[in-house]
Image (cartoon, rainbow, N blue to C red):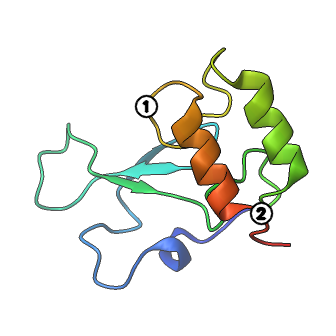
Amino acid sequence: MFYDLDDLLVPDAPVTSASPVDINDHGQIVAYGPYVPYDTPVVLLTPTCRGDLDGDDQTDQADLGLLLASYEFDDGGDLDGDGDTDQADLGILLADYGCGT
């Protein structure tokens, strides 16, 4: 599913849809703000359902399974962006569980 980046921006946020630079495996968009040097990413736009690991716009059992398969093993369930899958990521997913359903 594709989105217009303008629809994902918070009104009056210090970022424009012309400044996104990357998207990670979790659908998070890295962008630059206009008042920061352009070699420093400053904004991470997150999908509506933060615990959605499989990209179906829902946080459900499938996402929980993906997270548990990566738990303390790799970053496949990394929801907080710290490079691993751990208790913090599980907390994020459980807090978001049911989103989009």
* Residue 57, disc: 2
Three-letter amino acid code of the residue under disc 2: Asp
Query: Tag 1: Cα neighbours inside 10 Å, few (<14), some, or many (≥20)?
Result: few
Position of residue 35 measured from the top left corner of the image (x, y, whole percent): 10, 60
Position of 76 relative to 11 (above/below)? above
Judged left or right of residue 27, residue 16 is: left
Can see residue 13? yes
Residue corresponding to mark 1: 82
* Residue 35, disc: none
* Mark 1–mark 2 distance (CA, rounded to whole Å): 22 Å
Judged left or right of residue 43, residue 71 is: right
Q: Secondary structure at mark 1?
A: loop
- Residue reaching furthest to the top: 73
Q: Secondary structure at mark 2?
A: loop
Three-letter amino acid code of the residue under disc 1: Asp
Q: Residue at x 41, y 67 (%)?
A: 17
**Viewer-side residue, 85 vs 10:** 85
Q: Residue at x 77, y 51 (%)?
A: 55
- Residue reaching furthest to the bottom: 11
